[in-house]
Each structure stands twice: as C-alpha cells, then as structure tokens.
Image (spheres, helix red, strand yellow):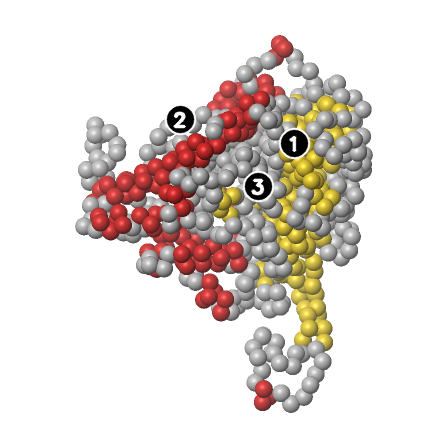
Amino acid sequence: MNNQGTMSQEKMELDLDISSSLVQSDGHLRRSNSEPMINGLSDASQVFQREVLRSRRNSTTVVRPNVVPSSPVRVPSTRLQRIKQEEGVDVMNRETAHEREVQAAMQMSQSWEESLSLSDNDLEKSSSSSPKRIDFVPVSPAPSPTRGIGKKQCFSPSLQILVSSNGLTPSPVPSPTRRFRRSQSPINCIRPSIMGNLKRKGEMETESQPKRLFQGTTNMLSTEVSHLPELNTCSLSPDLLDGSLSSVGSSSDSPAKMEGVSPSSSNSPRTPLQDLSPK
Amino acid sequence: MDGDGDGQSRWCLSQVKGAVDDDVAEADIISAVEFNHSGELLATGDRGGRIVIFQQEQESKNLPQCHAEYNVYSTFQSHEPEFDYLKSLEIEEKINKIRWLPQKNAAHFLLSTNDKTIKLWKISERDKRPEGYNLKEEDGRYRHPSSLTTLRVPVFQPMDLMVEASPRRVYANAHTYHINSISVNSDNETYLSADDLRVNLWHLDFTDRSFNIVDIKPANMEELTEVITASEFHPLQCNTFVYGSSKGSVRLCDMRASALCDQHSKLFEEPEDPSTRSFFSEIISSISDVKFSHSGRYMMTRDYLTLKIWDLHMESRPVEIYQVHGYLRSKLCSLYENDCIFDKFECCWGGDDSEVMTGSYNNFFRMFDRDAQRDATLEASWESGSPGLPLKTWRVCAGSRRKRNEIGVDCLDFSRKILYTSWHPQDNIVALATVNNLYIFQEKLN
C-alpha cells in the first residue's frame, strides 16, 4: 500500500471545501472531529484518557500512546480557530504537511518498536513496515449510499436479544429475565473480543449465526485481509484486532530486550523493566 | 435567580438504565436522547453508533403514583465507523442527534445522524410469520425432495413480537463539516441538517440531493468569525427556522424570502455588557442548543452559563434569563484549561412550556418553573433514593458546605456532566443521560 507515500507527491484536485479535521501534533492520528478536542475525544470525555481510546475498536487509528509527542502541550482552541487554521493555509501545503505528519507518526511508532526490540529479525521488522500501515489502510471502502439499505436488524423485546429476521432465535438463548445492561448489549460487533474468530467474509457467510451482528464488521475485516494476503494470519488476528498495538509481531518480545533504551531519566533507578513492556 | 428549593422536589427517580460499574467502555457513552411525539418511545444513541429504543409499558393506569416504566423495545446499529482515506481521517460513528418523525402508520420512523451521514430508520413490529413452506423446514433447511408428497399453503402463525429496524434512506455526502443538528419540518416532508458553516434542506424521499439554504462561509476564510452551532425548524410554521452561532446570536430565517437564507429575517442577540467582558466572554456566549417552545411563540437558547427564553417578536433581548450554574463564572479559567468550557449542553421544554430544564456538572440537572419563578437543582444518581421517593434539592455554595444538601463548588465533579436531555411531550417525565447511564425521572402524581 503506497497510498500514504505517493499522495503527497501527486497533484490532486482538491475541493477547497476541506473537511474539518486536524492532525494533532502529538503524533496521534486524529479522528475527524468537529468539536474542540479533549485528548482526542470530544464532549464528555476528558475523564477518559488514552486507555479508553485503546479499548474502543479495532479500526481505531490510534498510534501507541507512549509515542513521544512532538508537542507536549495541548492548546485548547475553539471550533472557529480550528477551521480557520486549516483553511487559511495553501491547500497543497496543508495536505503535504498532513501527510508528512502521518508518515512521521508511523515512522516514529515503527522506530520506537524497533529500538525496543533487540531480536535478530531486525530485517524482518523493517520489511514488515507494511503491517504497521494496516492501521491506516482503509478498513472499509468509501461509504456507498446503498450499503446497509434493506438490511434489517431484528430485536425481540420479550427475550431482550437480537434475532434473525426469520424469527428464529440463535442458540444458546440467554435467560429472558436478564435485565438490560447497556454495556453487555448484544450488539458487540465492535468489541475486539468478538473478533477473535473472524477470518474471512466467506467463512462468515456460511456460518449459521444470524447476520445481525457482524454486517459492517465483516466488511471491514474482509477488506483488510484481502488486501494483505502475504501476511501471517496468526499475527493479524489478536494483535491487530486489539486496536491498542500499532505493530505486529513484536508484542511477544520479552521485556528484557528493552534494556538500555528506557526513555525515562537516568537519574532514577530503573529496575522494573516491566514498566516498559508494551501492552 | 439562584435560589434553592425547599429541600424536596416534585420529581422522583423512576428508572436507571445501563451498567453501574465504573469501568465504562467508550462506545457505551450516551450521546443522544429523544422522546418521540407521543412519548411512548424513548430513543438513545451512543458513541458506538448504536440506538436503543425504550417503550413505555401500556398497562400502567392502575398505578396512580407513577407513570409506566420504559423497557427495551429495539436496539440496532445505526452508524458504523468509517475511514476517509483521502484525508487519512476517521469518521466516528457516534450518534450526534436523533429526531423522530410524526407517526403516520403502524411503523415508527426516526432520523439519526453522525458527523457526516444521516439515516432514516423504520422501526416496525412483526408478530406473525409464515409457516408451512413446502420446500423448507421451519429452521431453514431444505427438505429432501423425496419427502415431498403433498402440497400445502403456508399460513401465518403468531410468533413472539419482533421489532425490526431497517434503514430506509441514507443521506450522505452533503456536509463538508461535522453535522451538529437535524430538525424535521412541520410539513413532514423535509428536514434540515446543519454543520459548522452550512444548513442544508432535504426532502425525506430523496437522498441524492439537498438544497443549501444557509452558507456562512466567507470567500476569505480569514474573515470567518463565527460558526453555526445549532439549528431547528419552527414547530408550526414550515417556512421558519433558526440557527444559533458560536458568538451567542440566533438568526431566524424565512425560506419564503429567498432561496438562500444568508440574510436573516430576525437576529436575536443580547447586547453585551462591556463591564463583564473578559477573555472568555465569547466562548461562554456560544449557543449550545436552541429549542422552540411547543407553542411556537418562544425560543430557548442555552449557552455555557445561562438559559435564555426569547419571545420571537422581540429581538433585542431575552424575556427571561436563568442562571444554570453561575458559581462557575469565577472558575472559567480552569474550565478552559480542562476544556469543560466547550461542553455543549442541551435544554428542553416541558410539555406545556411552563417549565424548562437543562443539565449541569456533578450529575446535577436544573429545573426552572417559569410561572412560579422557582428553580431546583437535582442530582442524577442511582444512590439518590429509591424509585418513588422525591428527590432532594441541592445547593452549590462558594465555600465549604454547611448543610446536608450543600456542596462546595470546588467539590464538583466536572467529569460527570449531563449534556443530553429530553422531556416527554405531554407528561412530566424527563430522560437524561449521564456518561453511560440513562435516567428517567417523573413527577409525583399524588
């Protein structure tokens, strides 16, 4: 996938009506956000630090939180200031700068992982830069206006579960007396834990499970998987779907290999290497 | 007018929905709450793009003390996360607004929107299904051809009630910026959607076109001074709508005047008091919500510290101003530091327009009785008494607390805020969202 690299060099016809987005300079790939940002989230969210961002879903493009930010101070700004800032600059320069920031963030994350891992397969690491781009590969195609039309989602109020559209309930049927609890909503399709078994869209379609839960998610994953056939499937599923890791394959490295590259001050005694282990 | 109540209010906790543990998944954070036009259904949207619809139980007339309970009626995934790979940006699936259409037949329709896409959902019931197919068993397996000896006609058999949600329309690709409001017109054919700089008019039946009716984007972006923050159609006049701005002004537009309503018909703006001007004046004057009264005569605006009621016939100043949490005026600097100053609170009218309410911090919400000119501060907490008991009112004091119902301003928890609220269209039932819980309060009837 060379999208990121070549986009900055191509001359693009850009509509001057540019989306209200801003890549924060702390290395995170920002979500397109109209609201003034609070640590990457908006509205009622300054309680929820980056840990919560991580647990969100597999498609999040959050780079690992302990990437060293280039600008540690976050300046609160109003919506107005952000729109002006984005649109005041020359369009081409802004797009180029944006792509450079994205590239830098990826490389920063990649080099961080490389420096932490003293394994023998450094060559593999550098050649495995493409897996790191998975975070930035579009996880779903451009939204088609017809997508989702006609796909019913059916719910049974008496059983408080989702059912298939022909009225049959999936097995096993949970207790109908279970009180509705939002965090255990039957629609868990974005939860990473559910993803563990999903491999390919083809497999999903032949399963007897009701289609309700996995419509969009299946599409997302199928795009990923089909675009990167050369990757080891094992390394794809748990790490990638966790959403918290931006590198593939390095999470199995033992903490001991990170000795000597601690970013913290050398004044304080640094015995617990477990502090630095990637999560 | 920051008086305290007499210790007890008329309101009592009816239900709490959602998990009670402290570990909240971000996808569960509620981001929209809306009653339908009859009050029978209550829809909530969350950051995970899901919508949950609650239905009021019908067999409640024999319980005079309280209105009926709301139970889960339907739940579905409305929006999914998308990725704009042209700009390397993620489009969040968080539901920004839900608006119901007036009911025309047995099915219910609602509009839900995230930052970029609006969808029309049809929610319908099914309680019968055909049984007795010739070629398939009941579980879908095909019957062996040799077992087919007779022909039969499938018949409809009753089944457990099933609620289907199906997307009927997807209105996409009309907004460059993030959609902050949608509003269904009283003509029940059109609706508007507003983003930071533009307001678009849609016909419900057509997804491939929308008319731009307000465009405040200047030719030179350096001249941009304000953005659109909220917009709503008049409840009775199908040609009238308003939009609020980040500078604290509300513009009323008449679509009969011209196709492009950049020129407002009325401008509602309170002249600023120069003595209170500060660095934060403009930020706290930003309109976070604008709502017409049910009568259509008045309009309510919410800015960071106050609620203002405007008479549509008078543009110069509001007719009523209510302080929501005036004690925060001296704390604006720290609220700017932690970004709370940018929180967008909603507000809502009571069914007969005599009361209004809005949310605040520390899971407090504020009730204002316009007729009696009284207000109350109530807390949404599942510890606040058992259902049926009247809530106690709170008072926030500047120093340390002296009485039981008091809390010091420095003890407020600014992470617990009530941004999203909705009031039943006829009865005194309010639904509001804390971070991940839905609270339903109702007035004591006896």
Mark-to-mark CA distance, 2 and 3? 27 Å
Among numbered discs 1 and 3, the one appearing first in the sequence: 3
Q: In this rendering, does residue A274 appear at all?
A: no
The residues bearing labels 2 and 1 have C-alpha atoms spaced at a distance of 34 Å
Question: Is the C-beta separation of discs 2 and 1 under 8 Å?
Answer: no
Which residue corresponds to the image point at 63% horizontal and 39% vertical from the top-left? Answer: B432
- What's the mark number on residue B115? 3
Task: Judge depth for marks 2 and 3 and give the one in front.
Answer: 3
Label 2 crowd (10 A; few <14 / some 14-19 / many >=20): few
Nearer to me, B225 or A215 = B225
Q: Chain of mark 2?
A: A
Residue at the (47%, 43%) spot, across then down: B86
Left-right relation of B251 to A208? right
Q: Amino acid at mark 2?
A: Val
- Depth check: B426 or A51 in front? A51
Q: Nearer the viewer, residue B345 or B381?
A: B345
Element class at badge 2: loop
**Same chain letter for marks 2 and 3:** no
Q: Is residue A235 visible?
A: yes
On the rendered structure, is A237 left or right of B177? left
Q: Is residue B198 above or below residue A190?
A: above
Q: Which residue is mark 2?
A: A73
Q: Residue tagged by mark 1?
A: B215
B89 with respect to A122 (left or right): right
Query: Secondary structure beneath disc 1?
Result: strand
Name the kind of residue labelled 1 in the image: Asp
Of circles 1 and 3, which is in front?
1
